[in-house]
Image (spheres, grey):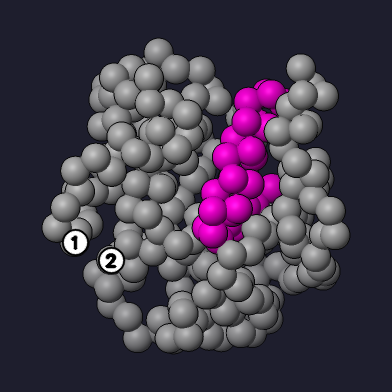
Amino acid sequence: MIELERVNKSYRKGAEEVKALVDVSFRVEAGEFIVVVGPSGSGKSTLMNVIGLLDRPDSGTCRLEGGDVAGFTADELARLRNEKIGFVFQTFHLLPKTTALENVELPLIYCSRVDISGLGARALEQVGLADRARHSPGELSGGEQQRVAIARALVNEPELILADEPTGNLDTQAGLEVLAIFQELNRQGKTVVLVTHDVAVAAMANRIVEIVDGRIVSDGFVDEPKDAREEMEVVS
């Protein structure tokens, strides 16, 4: 689905050049649930941005479904992000004066689909919030707000879900609820790539990739991932 080959990405921080990614080669197969772990500043979010077509690498190759995206225009990349990738962030990014349903439906404004009726309501139902559709973000708990954000990522029915520290602002119970949703989406065939610094979150994935100082230092499969719903029962 996504393939990076010897990707490098640097940023300027004052007079200093920060190497965020160094010769990173990384492949995401359809149907995987991958967690990328590493300390703060290790390059996790930069890797996510490159995978999500938000950043272009300085060098190296990024392929989406076998096609090199280097020659794509900004508009073409935006269309691909809208149609094929759903994004979930740590800070929710919900519009405060609109309802949960209206927040979920925002990506539909830019989609090319002919019939979008009912997609927002269906996405809210997927995350267990059908009864909160008319509530504003201020009327929802942190966990519910993140579930609205997940529904927004799902509304265009993308093949790939990218989540950057999605449990970082949540308590343990709410975080497990969110992870249970990601696990269920993966069981339904969605590809999930999740960035975290939390090893407990990583234990829920089928594959763990560790990045340190912009380099991938380990990449391995998990024999028996923990089940978030079972962990919820332990916590409760």
181 vs 26: above or below: above
Considering depth in this image, is 24 or 1 the residue closer to the camera? 1
Question: Residue flagged by tag 1: what amino acid is it?
Answer: Ser
Q: Which residue is mark 1?
A: 112
210 sits to left or right of 87: right
Q: Position of residue 153 (x, y in %)?
A: 41, 47
Q: Quadrant of residue 59?
A: bottom right
95 sits to left or right of 32: left
User: Which mark identifies residue 79?
Assistant: 2
Q: Residues within 10 Å of mark 1 (few under 14, many from 20)?
A: few
Q: Which region shows up in magenta?
A: 171-196
Position of the C terminus by quadrant: top right
Mark toward the start of the polypeptide (2 vs 1)? 2
Q: Tell me, yes or no, whether the two marked residues, 2 and 1, touch with CB atoms within 8 Å.
A: yes
62 vs 44: above or below: below
Q: For the point 58% across and 79% down, which residue is it?
A: 4
